[in-house]
Image (cartoon, grey):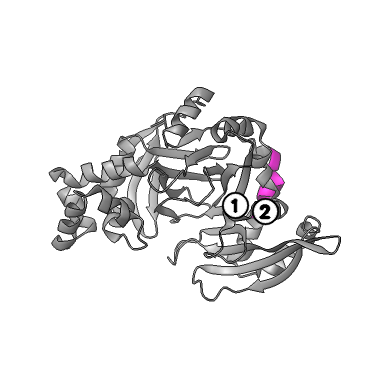
Amino acid sequence: MSNTGIRHFQTSPESHAGKLSRRGWALGWVAEQQRPDMPDSDTILRVWRADASIMLPGIIDVAGATEDIARACRLMEQTLDGTDLEASFEQSEYQSRLQAFQMVGVSSEEHDEQAIEKLYFDVEQDDVCIAESLWCKASWLSFHDEDASLRFRFSFGMEGFEDVAADPLRQQWAGTLCDAMFPESRLITANTRLLDILRPLLGAEPAFVERIVYFNAPNGGAQMHHDVERGHAGVVYAQLSGATFWLALSKPRLMDELHAFVSDPAHDGALAEVLPRAADRHELAVLMQDRTALSAYMEESDHELVEAVMDRSPAFTGYLVERGYAYRLEAGDVLLMPQRDLDTCVWHSVFCLGDEPGEALSFAIRAA
């Protein structure tokens, strides 16, 4: 665990404490006791190799991209108001940067209930298509009526079917498409301080792939999950505006903490609040005794028994805060999360702090 600066959690509000509320569940308030210091290079390398998250406070100068961040905020607001994504990107301020790309299709993604719209692009050079079926997809982060969180994801090919790691050229062009639509991406990709940190971690020049531009809104964020994908080493998350609260820890540590929490009779009441059926609590207790079964269960799409604890229990949230797995990210902060494989990856949970949505970048990294 690295120094996160957050150690204080409570179930009632006080001044300067951030409320943790997501999709109708209020989990408490947290206060940052002090801003963490920038870790040195040896510490960063040691923590990364230990499959733990690393916060890099203030490593981004967001003042250099004020206009781009404001433009992205307008795009978010237009999307929330129902403006077609195609119409938004046909505005002159985008067209000048999209000259290398030919829009070839628009999809409403009716098979995906969270999707809003998907734009497809090809890249041609000398009348030859060198990168086809690149796309930008706008989606809701959840189905909750009071969660206005959005994401703009960039990739290519058949979503959910194609092995994106097998085609680094199209991955690169999908990243270039993200650069054109959201030029504030350079706050990560052209950040010399960050690049100097990433090279020793990867043993090579970093490539930023499978990019997502997030707008976490009040009462929104992401439930506990991981981002493992073949060929990727981890994720770089950068807060550009607003603030977010994070819980982030490796899967082995998360399983350890779940076992310790569930096995402690002092938490029986807290478990009953999120798992009111005695049969469910018994099944969870049995699951905690078999680490292999627990690990496999966590990878299932429906893992309600542990999801109830990880995402809806104020007591478990407070437990993880007190154990040192919590972070508060403000504009200019970066969080690095190794995603080496399913057994070691950093799982993470995100909450929006404050009354306004904030923009953030979440880019997977791999060795170029």
The residue pinned by badge 2 equals: 178
Q: Is residue 168 magenta?
A: no
Kind of residue sitting beneath label 1: Arg
The magenta segment is 64-72
Q: Tag 1's secondary structure?
A: strand
Q: Is residue 16 visible?
A: no
Res 266 → quadrant? top left
Q: In the depicted view, which residue is nearer to us: 338 or 335?
A: 338
Q: Is residue 267 left or right of residue 301?
A: left
Residue extending farthest to the right is 126
Q: Is residue 94 left or right of residue 252?
A: right
Is 144 located above or below residue 197 in the figure? below
Res 276 → quadrant? bottom left
Is 1 located above or below residue 139 in the figure? above
The residue pinned by badge 1 equals: 211
Residue at image position (39%, 40%) is 17
Kind of residue sitting beneath label 2: Cys
Prevailing SS of the magenta stretch? helix
